[in-house]
Each structure stands twice: as C-alpha cells, then as structure tokens.
Image: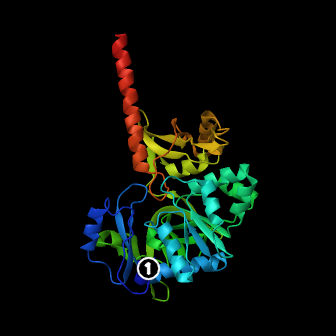
C-alpha cells in the first residue's frame, strides 16, 4: 500500500506480482524496458488465452476509475479484498482505498475460496459502507451458501455493493441475487481501462462506449497508456478518432462483441471466439450464454472441437463441484437438478440453429482457471485434447484385442 500510494503521487512506478521468484524473468525484462511517460503501475495480464501482456497505467487513469466507482456506488467505503492484488480487479480495490483514505481489509484466498470465511471476515469491516469485488464463481458459491443459511444471507445483504466482473453474470445468477436482496453490481472493464468502467450496462465517470463493426470500444480518463515494449499492439488496440468538432478522442478496441440498446451496453462475447461448423459461423460465447440459463449449467464453457464431417462442432465442459455441509460432502446447487444434456442440446438447436447444437458435454470437478477466476480456455482445450487422445487409444487397443 505504501508503494502504491507513492506511485499514485508521482513516485517510482510499481509492478505488482503474485510470486516474485516465479515471476523473476518477467520482472527482469520489465525492469529493463522503457516505460511510457507517466506510468505509475504496470499490470501483467494474460486474458483467457494466456498470452502475456504488460499494461502501463497512469496515476490519473487509476484515480479516475476509483473516483468514478465510489461516485456510482454512493460514496467512499471500506473494501474487503478477496481478489489477487497483482490483477487489476484486486489492485483497483487498493487504489480506491488509497484515494478514499480508508484502509482495506484483506481476505486470504491462497488455500481456496471459502464463502463462509469471507462473510465472517466481513464482520470486521469498520465503516458504515462496505464493498467487495468478486468473480462469478466466487459469487455463485456465496449465493449457494446464502440460500441454505439465513445468517449468511443477512451477512451478504450487509454489503452496500457486491461488484461482480471478469466474465458474464448469468440471468440465473442475477435472479438469485435479487431474490436474496443482495446489492449486486455487474462490472465490465479490463486492465486496459483500469478496471470496471461500465456498471450494469451504463458507463461510470467520463467513460464513453461505442460499437464499431460489432466491437465494443471504450474511451475516457481511465484508459491505459499502452503495452510495455509492444508499440505495434498499442497502435492496434488504442486508436484515435476525430470528433465532429475536430477534437481527438482515444478509443480502446476491446475485442468484445456487443450492442447498445437504449443506451445500455450488452456484451455478447468475444469477436475471436467463433468457429465454422458446416460452413456456418457459430459464436461460442453465444452458446455459453444460452446454455448457462439452464439449471446446473451455470459454469459451462463452450469450445470448438474437430469433427470429421462438419469441420468443427461445439463441445461443452461443465464444472460439478461439491461443498461441505454438516460434515458431509454434498453436490452444490450448480450440480444439483441438472437439466439433461439432450434437453439443453435441443433448446440450443431451436434457438441458435443446428450448427450451434453441442455435440458432447464433459464434466469435471474443477475447471482450470486463471488467477482472476476466468476459465483458462487454453488449458481446457489442452485437457480435452488429452482426454480425446486417451479415448482413441482405448478404442484402438480394444479393436486390437478383438482382432
């Protein structure tokens, strides 16, 4: 916090890291790199595909995001930090704390996320207004607990705002939060925008949103300076356009597909998450969004898998975690009363067309995830490839035995 405060006041830039020893090579490379002028913090981000980038953020951008958040939420408050501080989602809670002068409270998630322990830690928050920021998988487990424990539900309701971002919040999750009376705020943003800059579909602060070629683009004071050591990517993702009055506006190309309806932003997926199945373009994000509306499928991830006839088909991976209750391991809500795969498949076929209908569904106790909680798509695809390869070997061995 001391180093962050110094950086935000014009001191030496900082690089938050998860593990200094493991990140030694990246640290050395960034220490020798030329940083953009006015850099206060460098945040490493990999996105869902695991391609590392180093984003340079100014003190002005970080402060703008923090101040706009508190303005939207109704005032300064104390933050319970339950996300890694080397990622923008966790770091921004520290920036908000520094800007407001209210010390945060830290919740250790190194041993895994325990929703009951988080609510117990929330009892130690000292100010009238209390906030927390989570990723959907954490929030879902809090809802699971709150739905079976009245005291937990009361504790969750005491937060003045529960920011949830990092990936889409399903309609089912929103419904559950509403029924419990939880002050859910859906946050949309990324490292390149100094964290969340659109809440519940509406811009905060001076953020502006536009759609160009189906892509969501953002402008405002919270934009990053660019990517350290990668001027080509900076020029590709941060573009400058002239407004009607001749003034220049800098826009960030998010790579997300979306639409503006009634002034509210709806993100529909990633532009690059499209497969071609039998000559038909299929958005994997659109399939995911539809599948997650079904009971027990809230964690589903859609991936493209090779198919001998159609080129590619949609395949689903769904998490079926268990929770501890009264000394016994029981299925969580996400795994209970799961809608049948054939029911899900038929509904997707009717809604999105035959090419989008999932061909397979694979269950796993725990999805590979990145540090920020997003599903690690590359790791999931690699795991599926290994699984399919083992099935092929088994079938070949069985055939040889029959011969």
How are the residues colored? rainbow
Q: Can residue 255 be seen in this view?
A: yes
Q: Is residue 46 left or right of residue 151?
A: left
Q: In this view, does 51 lie above or below 5?
A: above
Q: Can residue 296 be seen in this view?
A: no
Q: Quadrant of the C terminus?
A: top left
Q: Is residue 35 above or below residue 265?
A: below
Which x, y percent locates residue 47?
42, 59
Secondary structure found at label 1: helix
Residue projecting furthest to the left: 32
Which x, y percent locates residue 139?
61, 57
Which x, y percent locates residue 327?
64, 40
* Tag 1 residue: 2
In front of the other: 56 or 117:
117
Q: Is residue 392 above or below residue 143?
A: above
Q: In this view, does 25 lie to the left or right of 263?
A: left
Could you tell me which residue is drawn at 42 percent across and 33 percent down?
A: 309
Using the rendered view, name the quadrant where residue 204 is placed.
bottom right
Mark 1 residue crowding within 10 angstroms, few (<14) / some (14–19) / many (20+): few
Q: Is residue 286 left or right of residue 147?
A: left
In front of the other: 141 or 273:
141
Which x, y percent locates residue 36?
32, 80
Could you tell me which residue is drawn at 61 percent across and 33 percent down?
A: 342
């Amino acid at each position: 916090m001391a180093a962050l405060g110094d950086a935000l006041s014009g001191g030496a830039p900082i690089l938050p890291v998860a593990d200094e020893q493991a990140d030694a090579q990246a640290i050395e490379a960034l220490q020798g790199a030329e940083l953009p002028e006015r850099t206060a913090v460098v945040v490493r981000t990999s996105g869902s595909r695991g391609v590392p980038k180093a984003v340079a953020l100014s003190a002005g951008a970080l402060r703008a995001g923090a101040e706009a958040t508190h303005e939207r939420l109704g005032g300064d408050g104390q933050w319970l930090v339950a996300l890694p501080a080397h990622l923008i989602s966790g770091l921004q809670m520290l920036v908000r704390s520094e800007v407001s002068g209210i010390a945060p409270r830290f919740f250790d998630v190194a041993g895994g996320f325990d929703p009951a322990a988080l609510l117990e830690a929330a009892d130690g928050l000292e100010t009238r207004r209390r906030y927390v920021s989570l990723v959907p998988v954490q929030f879902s487990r809090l809802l699971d607990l709150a739905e079976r424990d009245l005291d937990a539900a009361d504790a969750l309701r005491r937060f003045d705002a529960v920011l949830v971002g990092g990936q889409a919040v399903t309609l089912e999750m929103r419904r559950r939060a509403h029924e419990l009376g939880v002050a859910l705020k859906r946050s949309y943003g990324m490292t390149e925008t100094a964290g969340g800059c659109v809440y519940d579909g509406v811009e905060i602060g001076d953020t502006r949103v536009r759609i160009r070629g189906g892509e969501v683009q953002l402008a405002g004071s919270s934009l990053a300076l660019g990517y350290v050591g990668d001027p080509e990517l900076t020029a590709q993702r941060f573009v400058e356009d002239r407004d009607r009055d001749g003034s220049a506006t800098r826009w960030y190309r998010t790579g997300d597909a979306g639409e503006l309806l009634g002034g509210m932003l709806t993100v529909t997926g990633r532009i690059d998450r499209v497969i071609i199945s039998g000559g038909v373009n299929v958005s994997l994000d659109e399939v995911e969004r539809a599948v997650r509306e079904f009971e027990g499928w809230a964690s589903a991830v859609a991936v493209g898998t090779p198919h001998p006839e159609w080129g590619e088909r949609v395949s689903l991976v769904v998490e079926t975690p268990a929770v501890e209750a009264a000394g016994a391991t029981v299925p969580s809500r996400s795994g209970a009363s799961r809608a049948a795969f054939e029911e899900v498949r038929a509904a997707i076929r009717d809604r999105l067309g035959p090419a989008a209908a999932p061909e397979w569904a694979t269950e796993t106790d725990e999805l590979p995830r990145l540090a920020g909680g997003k599903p690690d798509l590359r790791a999931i695809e690699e795991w599926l490839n290994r699984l399919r390869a083992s099935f092929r070997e088994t079938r070949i061995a069985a055939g040889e035995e029959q011969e």
